[in-house]
Amino acid sequence: MKKSKLLTTTILILVLCLTITNPTMLAYAEEENIHKVESVEALAYTRINNETITLPVKIDLTFKVTDYFKRLTTTNLVEGSISIGDESYVVDNGWAIALHRTNMPGIKAFAEGWCTGENAHFIILAVDIGKAEDGNGILMKFKCGFKHTEGWYYINGTLLRYKL
């Protein structure tokens, strides 16, 4: 009886520690949940006439969870937009997959999207880096390749993801 209580207590403490240190271990992704991803800070880089041009970027994407497996979450894009400098693109098709990491807290995510009206395509790789200062959401470092009819951009920065 004592061993059983000790084992139960140990397991509860372990689960509590994992939940406190890793907020994504909570039931964060369930089917039909809506998740928002917004840029906190981001810059786009491109080369024109052998000169590097840097432009500010604003990313705003909304995803709906389509399935949740043990360590994988799949989503479809609901709506989105990306602004690079003075140009704005409507993201009308896309998906993302998130892998809940076992060696450290958080997720690694891969997303792909299309802006069919503007004939543009992008790929994002993002990794959790911690909670937002206000506690509402998770910050992610990201890299992005963005290709459109007139060229391409390499984008990197910080995203904020949160559940609506």
Image (cartoon, helix red, strand yellow):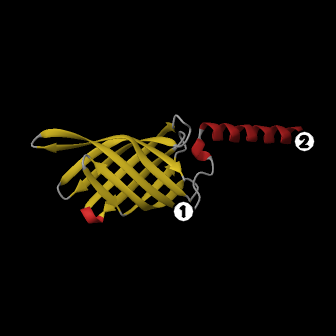
Q: Is residue 145 left or right of residue 100?
A: left
Q: Is residue 130 left or right of residue 10?
A: left
Binning the other alpha carbons within 10 Å of mark 2 as few (below 14), some (14 to 19) or many (20 upward) gives few
Going from N to C along the chain, the mark reached first, 1 or 2, is 2
Q: Is residue 34 above or below residue 8?
A: below
Task: Out of 23 and 15, give the one closest to the viewer.
Answer: 23
Which residue is the extreme one toward the top?
A: 133
- Identity of the amino acid at label 2? Met
In this figure, which residue is indicated by the disc labeled 2?
Answer: 1
**Residue depicted at x 33% and y 59%:** 90
**Residue depicted at x 51% and y 54%:** 35
Task: Out of 61 and 50, give the one closest to the viewer.
Answer: 61
Give the image location of residue 22, x and y in percent.
59, 40
Which residue is the extreme one toward the right?
A: 1
Q: Is residue 91 above or below residue 1?
A: below
In this figure, which residue is indicated by the disc labeled 1?
Answer: 67
Distance from disc 1 to disc 2, alpha carbons, whole Å, reads 40 Å
Mark 1: secondary structure: strand
